Image: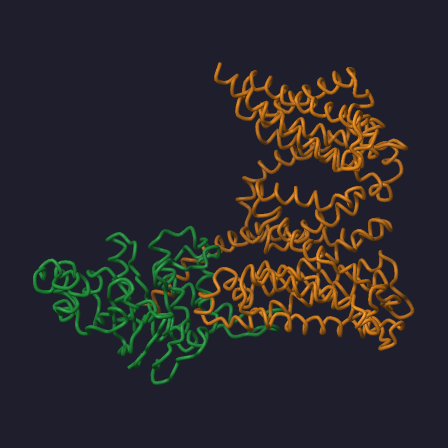
Amino acid sequence: MGMGREQAVRRALVYGLIGGIVAWHLSLVGLIEAFAGRRLIGQGVTFSYVLLLAVMLTVGYLVARRVSNWTGLAGAALAGLLVGLALWALALLVDQVDLRTIFVAASPTLPEILTFNRGAGAVGLIVLLLVGAAAGFIGGGLTWFPATGRRAVITALSITVLVGLLRDVLNPVLPALVMGFLFTTTGGLSLPGAVVVLALALAFPIARHVVAQRAGERRAALPAPARRRRRAVFRLISLVFLVSFPLWAGLFLSNVTDFVGLYILMGLGLNLVLGFAGLLDLGYVAFFAIGAYSMAVLTSPELGHFTLGFWEALPIAVAITVLSGILIGLPVLRMRGDYLAIATLGFGEIVRLLVLSDWLKPHLGGAQGVTRIARPELGPFVIDRPQEYYYLILIGCALAWFLSVRLRDSRIGRAWMAIREDEDVAQAMGINRVTAKLLAFATGASMGGLSGALFASLVNSVIPQSFSLLVSINVVALLVLGGIGSLPGVLVGALALVGLPELLREFQEYRLLVYGAVLIAMMIFRPAGLWPEETRVRELEEAAEEARARAPAEVVVVTQDGE
Amino acid sequence: MLLQARQVTKRFGGVVALHSLDLEVREQTIHSIIGPNGAGKTTFFNCVTGFLVPEEGEIHLAGEPITGLRPDQIARLGIARTYQTIRLFRYLTVLDNVLIGLHPHVRYGFLDAVVHTRRYHRSEREAEAEARELLRYVGLAGKEFVIANNLSYGDQRRLEIARALALRPRLLLLDEPTAGMNPYETDQMITLIRRLRDERGMTILLIEHDMKVVMNISDLVTVLDFGEKIAEGKPAEVQANPRVIEAYLGRGAASGLGGIAARVLGDESASDAGS
């Protein structure tokens, strides 16, 4: 018991300190203040408080995780209390000393936010300590739940917070009646709304768990054709959802979805290069830029070189990108790993600097870029709204997806994977690495180019700033997040990494900070990505099953002509 | 002669890894290369497969010069190899490993793959049938969809051979195929290598340290030391050669410690060599 107490106290001190540092960090970089305006539930509960409470809960959870008794819970409360103390200390510090020359975010409003408007005095201290201890205690209490229940609670809480955050997004989508019930007019979720969302979020996974457990037994007995039929139904529903999306989504959501779609297209392209062939291309933005600028130069009357229509320019733009993919691929064929990454990084920057340069200004528009890029016409109908572009992008993504699947399941895909796994052995297996790699670069580039061409036409202009290194990093990051080499992973990655930040405008400023945190967390908890190649694993299992069913007949054949 | 190496010299900086090496491999034989560590055995394999280009000399496969060709070209001409340390595509399935080996023989293009032409379906079906047949041949039937990394050590070695066979090679280079195996696995491997020669008419050039294996299965043995050929002949002849004993045990050993050397070189299995 003495041991347990000592350990609990030590853990409480350590995690309390870490939690305090995290809380200070969140406050001083400005996240807390930025999110103070985001009301999640009613007027009072803002996203800042949710963040701070999450820190306290986590700290409590971590303390109690190894010491699962009342001593552990006391330790958890102590750790939460320490975080509260740290926050109060910060409030006091900011209140007394002007830190704004160093920390812009340390404004006079920060202490008010941190202390729930109780001030950095004794009252504020008591409130913070109580809240901290309570949150730490609850966090510690979570360790007493079984793992599945705990996960369900955490997921449900996260979903509730997400629904609260996405108020503006849901507004045009949901019927006014539902919106009126769920949300208050000025703030976040109404109290009954929050309860309903939380209850639904809790009930749904539990119900699914129960159903899945019962169905799991049935599913094993389900023959492959029935499973395939079920999958077809699922696909049909997704198709209806995808096709009808712009009809009910509204302008804002369509706009965001278009950008997500462009990133999915790029992600699929880079997935061929990085995911399948294992070539780390850090300059993928080059293809995006070349596609966009090809579209601009070919169609904009501003430059006066060509004034093609969108449909004539599109295949040419893609062809130019493919060619550039081969050109970029050629010199880096022999490079591996880090060297390839650095070389391609250079190419990305070269392309950006070229379009920015005064030297090429008459041809590429220089820093001002190019405007008045052609819009696609269908007979008398001109596509110019995001809702309409959505369909173009959807078709592009579908094509890229189709191409990826077909190539993956062919000798070409196998050659890429062989090169990814071991280049020397791949060569010893008769694989020509030059053609295989160039094919990967060219096909990957075509998708980036298509994305760029669509982008140029969608926003109607191109400027060099749109083609920064950050785009390349985004695409690599979304692949890593979703699971490298996984096609559904590209979707998930793009939605999480491009979609979410677009929807939560306050995030924009802290995008990279959040990226870093998310990627680190992912490397620890889900190193294979959010959606790794599980589907492929399942397909393989099914194929094995069918093969086993077929096996006896084959054995007969073998004994006849085999040996 | 299936493989002819003439006056092959390979240097790494100042070190001469292979020195004017002549080596000929007759068709449908099991030919072993032995020698102390650093004798140049693996370097020779790398020269034959095109991963290293010798400074001097020429290598011919069935009369055709192959020196200077790229590794994938040489592989397509019919030389397949396995590695001293297993180098499978570890995270791919057993079947995919063999299908990759079949790469040069699965013939269809980009468009066939994308639109799934009849040619694609036929080629893929044939390739899969051949891959399954090869896996059955080496004793891996039923493990087609296992991830290669999850196979047992002996199975991994066998998969490497199946993958090499998928190239439909004329010459198979095996780099220490029984390294790290227990006696039971070693016996199985010996049987498999013999079957490759007898049933499939394969020509096999192998590097091996286990003298019991070498003396057991070799038709001919070549001994290298410091990049030079010091002896060649039937296993029993090589075993008795004083220069070989010297190379293995150091100078003077040939006279005084002949008995030990003979035991090191595995005389108890010499009786059935070449049978």
Q: Position of residue A440 (x, y in %)?
A: 60, 67
Q: Residue at x 68, y 72 (%)?
A: A324
* Residue ranking furthest to the bottom: B63
Q: Look at the image and tell me whether residue A267 can be seen.
A: yes
Q: Position of residue B183 (x, y in %)?
A: 23, 53
On screen, residue B266 versus residue A52, left or right, reads left
On screen, residue A317 versus residue B211, left or right, reads right
User: Which quarter of the picture shows residue B155?
Assistant: bottom left
User: Which quarter of the picture shows residue A258?
Assistant: bottom right
Q: Residue at x 39, y 67 (%)?
A: B164
Chain depicted in orange: A
Q: Position of residue A232 (x, y in %)?
A: 66, 53
Q: Position of residue B9 (x, y in %)?
A: 33, 77
Chain depicted in green: B
Question: Where does the C terminus of chain B fall, quadrant-wise?
Answer: bottom left
Q: Residue at x 39, y 65 (%)?
A: B133
Compared to residue A140, the image places residue A405 above or below, namely below
| Along the viewing direction, whichever of A477 and A347 lies nearer the viewer | A347
Q: Look at the image and tell me whether residue B4 can be seen.
A: no
Compared to residue A490, the image places residue A15 above or below, namely above
Q: Residue at x 54, y 39 (%)?
A: A217
User: Which quarter of the picture shows residue B269?
Assistant: bottom left
Question: Where does the N terminus of chain B fall, quadrant-wise?
Answer: bottom left
On screen, residue A40 versus residue A277, left or right, reads right
